[in-house]
Image: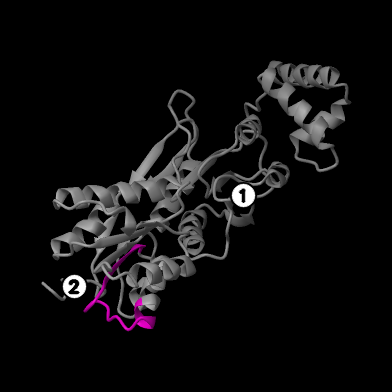
Amino acid sequence: MPGEDEVDRRVTLATVAREAGVSLPTVSKVLNGRSDVSPATRAKIERLLDSHGYCRRTPGAPQSPLIEIVFHELESVWAMELIRGVENVAKRTNATVALTESGTRQAPGPEWIAGVLRRRPLGVLLVFSTVPEDVKRQLRSRAIPFVIVDPAGDPDPDVPSVGSANWAGGLAATRHLTDQGHRRVAIITGPPDLMCSLARLDGYRSALTMAGLDVDPELVRFGDFHVQGGYDHALELLRRPDRPTAVFAGSDLQALGVLEAARVLGLSVPGQLSVVGYDDVSLAQWSSPPLTTVQQPLQRMAEEAARMLLRPPDPRKAAQRIELATHLVIRQSTAPPADG
């Protein structure tokens, strides 16, 4: 005999099917992420499931013990660090790590959700700034836990997330340069629509204020976190007659672009230009010269997020937000300015 909860679930699904004007198997297809349902019908059923408060109280066993990581960009140094962190946790629980590329920096694409509902993983780790409301509802209605690993943004308060201290990192990088005597310090931060870019910029501004220096808007640039963006902005900055003596780059990749621009212009680092990066990815120590940078603990962030996914949920508690500390790693790309 089915239990009371099972009867209630069947009644709810039958009601949804009747109100949507579809068969019960069609509702089942939507619940299981099948692709053979039209987008309009799928959206109608999802709205009705949500309005009726449908939720699997005891989710069935996943098809495989799978932790899924969803990136907007898989071919990046950040992705590799995060994958290693998740794998460190997954191998202790005999789980498999699956990788998906979807969407933009802000959120996964709409095509992803149907696939994850079919796969029914143990949990989903999202490397995005936000999660759309309809995606949250669908994951929660299927009892699939999710966590944002947040090197980029500021997630909604109802979304579990793991991030790092971006403002403190920007402050530490810039203070290192002003403490060495630099008075014209430029910044090439990340895209202006990402909270991490703005937080690092705020840390930079705070450090200049603490040193009694004005913020010159001509020395503030928004990049894209990649080598080419760092190179292009650095060429413009370093060709100025009043060029900066130091550059804080909002990522190690942008810092590599700054180093290349300095080489092209015949400027020695750190003799004529000091450079600080951000992230401390593995290649930072192999640049020429080895890069002073702010270490963002990407592997630890991913490990914490994976543990959150595997931890039994507590509905009485608010969504957990973990912020890990950053710290400055001093190498050979910074020195006092040549004029003292």
Furthest-left residue in this view: 340
Q: Secondary structure at mark 2?
A: loop
Foreground of the two, 4 or 192: 192
On screen, 303 above or below 56?
A: below
For the C terminus, the quadrant is bottom left
For the N terminus, the quadrant is top right
Residue 145 percent across, percent down from the top left: 56, 38
On screen, 9 above or below 139?
A: above
> Badge 2, how many Cα within 10 Å: few under 14, some, many 20+?
many
| Residue 48 falls in image quadrant | top right
Where does label 1 land, which residue?
Answer: 65
Q: Is residue 269 magenta?
A: yes
| Rendered residue at 31%/72% (across/down) | 291
| Rendered residue at 42%/45% (across/down) | 195
User: What amino acid is found at the position of numbered circle 1 in the picture?
Assistant: Pro
Residue 339 percent across, percent down from the top left: 13, 74
On screen, 90 above or below 20?
A: below
Q: Is residue 126 magenta?
A: no
Please provide the residue range marked out in magenta: 262-279
> Badge 1, how many Cα within 10 Å: few under 14, some, many 20+?
some
User: What amino acid is found at the position of numbered circle 2 in the picture?
Assistant: Ala
Q: Is residue 330 left or right of residue 304?
A: left
The Cα atoms of the two marked residues, 2 and 1, are separated by 50 Å
